[in-house]
Image (cartoon, rainbow, N blue to C red):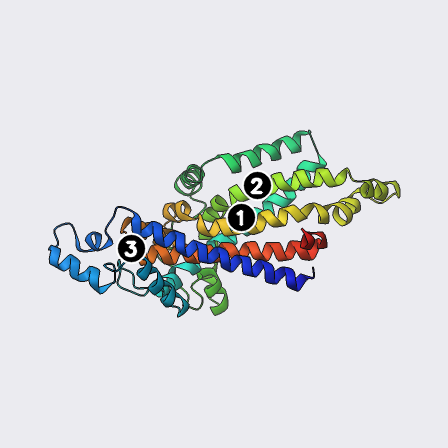
């Protein structure tokens, strides 16, 4: 099977998965014992007014009819009107998503920058003290709760020592950059607002590390395990027998093959970061998709919940598809499995 057919088959499977996600989330959101209209109007609203609003937004129609209307609007790019703020859900998502993408991308960069070198060192110094330190670090990343790490670092680095800023994207005395992409650091860079860029980067450090620590632990463990396995292969022993320097053997012959499983973890983890930033965004007052999703669930804002779920599913599926394609490109045997 060539690469194009492989990509087409994976893309078709992705569309099928997304269609299933819309059906499952739509049914679940409409069978939960909560009335979005009553939540919006209040518990003392007149029954006649509740029924009138339910009719206006189509909640009095049979569920299959509502789903057909939902899918029809979806194909036209209409995600519905948010009950919470009476704005198109697509506008809300366009407002909140860039902040989450900025934070998740920074967290992924932190995770890769820490995880891969730590995993390599851990494998090269197997069972010695660098390996023990790296394994404790990885275990902490995968086992410590996000809120605990966040509160601990905020308490020490912000409240006690004052060497890093606290919650938010910018300090209160910093002039925000012009809105270009919605990502403050990127907008500051593009507009040449150097003070805003410096402040935005400092505000990114803590939430990016907290969000990326879990991923760094996973990447460390995956890189260590893969590299140890590759270092036992015959071609690595042959390279060493030829007298090649150990650094060249590791970097040119072992690490490239060892990183194949790590690429999968990185891709899937990035999708998880985008969808799992709720706690981090809440603790650091980050105006991203996580906080919007939380408020939507609390307000029983069904159109907003469906919109957030769909966007997260699309991002996660695209990340998964990109990983599959990259893996198939690097290892042709995958195309035939």
Q: Position of residue 89 (x, y in %)?
A: 34, 62
Instruction: Report the residue at 39% width, 65% height from top.
Output: 74
Residue under the point 55% across and 54% down: 320
Task: For marks 3 and 2, give the CA distance.
Answer: 35 Å
Nearer the observer, 12 or 236: 12
> Up-down: is 327 above or below 114?
below
- Dot 3, crowdedness within 10 Å: few (<14), some or many (≥20)? many
In front: mark 1 or mark 3? 3
Residue 337 spot, x, y in % from top left: 67, 50
State the residue position of label 2: 218
Say which residue label 3 marks: 301
Disc number placed over residue 269 in the picture, else none: 1
Q: Nearer the viewer, residue 89 or 213?
A: 89
Please tell me which of labels 1 and 2 falls first in the chain: 2
Give residue 229's position: percent from left, percent from top. Answer: 72, 38
Task: Give the left or right position of residue 329, taking residue 74 as reference.
Answer: right
The answer to the question of whether label 1 and label 3 lie on touching residues, with beta carbons closer than 8 A, is no
**Looking at the image, do the residues carrying marks 1 and 2 touch, with CB atoms under 8 Å apart?**
yes
Q: Nearer the viewer, residue 264 or 113?
A: 264
SS of the residue under disc 2? helix
Please report the residue visible at 65 percent of the width from the left and 42 percent of the height from the top.
223
């Amino acid at each position: 099977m060539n690469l194009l057919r492989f990509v087409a088959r994976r893309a078709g499977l992705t569309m099928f998965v997304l269609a299933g996600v819309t059906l499952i989330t739509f049914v679940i959101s409409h069978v939960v014992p909560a009335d979005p209209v009553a939540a919006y109007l209040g518990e003392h609203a007149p029954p006649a007014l509740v029924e009138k609003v339910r009719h206006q937004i189509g909640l009095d129609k049979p569920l299959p009819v509502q789903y057909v209307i939902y899918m029809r609007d979806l194909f036209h790019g209409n995600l519905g009107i948010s009950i919470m703020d009476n704005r198109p859900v697509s506008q809300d998502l366009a407002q909140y998503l860039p902040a989450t993408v900025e934070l998740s991308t920074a967290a992924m960069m932190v995770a890769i920058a820490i995880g891969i070198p730590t995993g390599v060192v851990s494998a090269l110094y197997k069972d010695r003290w660098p390996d023990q330190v790296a394994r404790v670090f990885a275990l902490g990343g995968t086992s410590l709760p996000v809120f605990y790490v966040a509160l601990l670092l905020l308490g020490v680095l912000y409240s006690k020592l004052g060497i890093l800023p606290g919650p938010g994207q910018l300090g209160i005395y910093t002039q925000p950059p012009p809105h270009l992409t919605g990502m403050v650091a990127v907008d500051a860079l593009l507009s040449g607002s150097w003070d805003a860029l410096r402040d935005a980067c400092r505000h990114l450090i803590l939430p990016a590390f907290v969000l990326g620590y879990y991923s760094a632990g996973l990447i460390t463990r995956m890189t260590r395990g893969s590299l140890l396995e590759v270092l036992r292969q015959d071609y690595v022993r042959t390279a060493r027998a030829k007298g090649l320097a150990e650094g060249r053997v590791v970097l040119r012959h072992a690490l490239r093959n060892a990183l194949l499983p790590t690429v999968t973890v990185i891709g899937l983890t990035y999708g998880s970061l985008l969808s799992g930033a709720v706690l981090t965004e809440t603790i650091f007052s980050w105006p991203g998709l996580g906080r919007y999703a939380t408020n939507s669930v609390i307000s029983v804002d069904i159109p907003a919940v469906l919109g957030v779920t769909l966007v997260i599913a699309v991002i996660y599926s695209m990340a998964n598809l990109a990983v599959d394609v990259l893996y198939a490109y690097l290892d042709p045997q995958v195309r035939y499995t």
